[in-house]
Image (cartoon, rainbow, N blue to C red):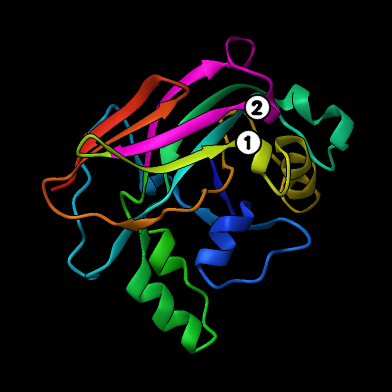
Amino acid sequence: MKIICIGRNYAAHAKEMKSEVPKEPVFFMKPDTALIIRNQPFFIPDFSEEIHHEVELVLKINKVGRNIEEKFAHKYYDEIGIGIDFTARDLQARCKEKGLPWEMAKAFDGSAPLGEFKRKEDLPKPEMIGFHLDINGKTVQEGNTRDLLFSFDKIIAYVSRFITLKKGDLIFTGTPEGVGPVKINDKLEAYIGEEKLLSFNVK
């Protein structure tokens, strides 16, 4: 099982990060040890002083595919969930300054809490799905797939040019604006529409 993450897929988020808006999908990967499931707590690691939340819709791949044409990409997932792409922003900044890869800032253990999934047919059209993240009862991030730079189908087609997708692989599809730090004792709750699908504490 692979975790593939799409970066800068919402223009407003790219702007808040002072990053260039990409002309094609940007992706990176996390190992399976990044996953946190069943609403288990997230423990702030001792190597970072600036862990940021990034709420994202997540696609679960349902069959093997390589070089998938965009017009067929919708057949390669039938469930959509929600998760958090935690980022050690201080480590990321340090790596960027030196022109180094920044997996240590994105792929560390526990950096991908994953919520429940919903069947695609039980949700709005893929281009009309709203989602949000609350911290301690206050909404801090809010997004809608109508603002995606690259659609779910385009992401699947693009990634599968380089990497064979397999059943069970997860694609984190990008975060909207509003990313920010988390601290000990925060409670994070992530929603698709008004349905809470992920809830956990920071320790």
Q: Dot 2 corresponds to which residue? A: 128
Q: Position of residue 67 (x, y in %)?
A: 84, 43
Is residue 109 found left or right of 195 in the rendered image?
Answer: left
Q: Secondary structure at mark 1?
A: helix
Residue 2, quarter of the rendered image:
top right
Q: Position of residue 178 (x, y in %)?
A: 42, 53
Front residue of 33 and 4: 4
Q: Is residue 9 above or below residue 126?
A: below
Q: Which mark is residue 33?
A: none
Residue at (59%, 32%) from the top-left corner?
A: 59
Residue at (37%, 23%) from the top-left corner?
A: 197
- Magenta segment includes 115: yes
Q: Dot 1 corresponds to which residue? A: 145
- Residue 6 can be seen in this image: yes
Dots 2, 1 in contact, CB < 8 A: yes
- Residue 8 can be seen in this image: no
Is residue 41 found left or right of 148 in the rendered image?
Answer: left
Is residue 30 found left or right of 153 in the rendered image?
Answer: left
Report how far apart the C-alphas of labels 2 and 1 lie in the structure: 5 Å
Residue at (37%, 38%) from the top-left corner?
A: 133
Task: Return the residue found at the far top.
Answer: 122
Query: What kind of residue is marked 1?
Result: Thr
Residue 48, quarter of the rendered image:
bottom left
Which of the two labelled residues, at mark 2 and mark 1, occupies the earlier sequence position? Answer: 2
Q: Position of residue 62 (x, y in %)?
A: 65, 24
Q: Position of residue 138 (x, y in %)?
A: 26, 39
Magenta-colored span: 113-134
Task: Return the residue found at the far bottom.
Answer: 98
Number of callouts: 2
Q: Residues within 10 Å of mark 1 (few under 14, many from 20)?
A: many
Q: Residues within 10 Å of mark 2 (few under 14, many from 20)?
A: few
Residue 160, quarter of the rendered image:
top right
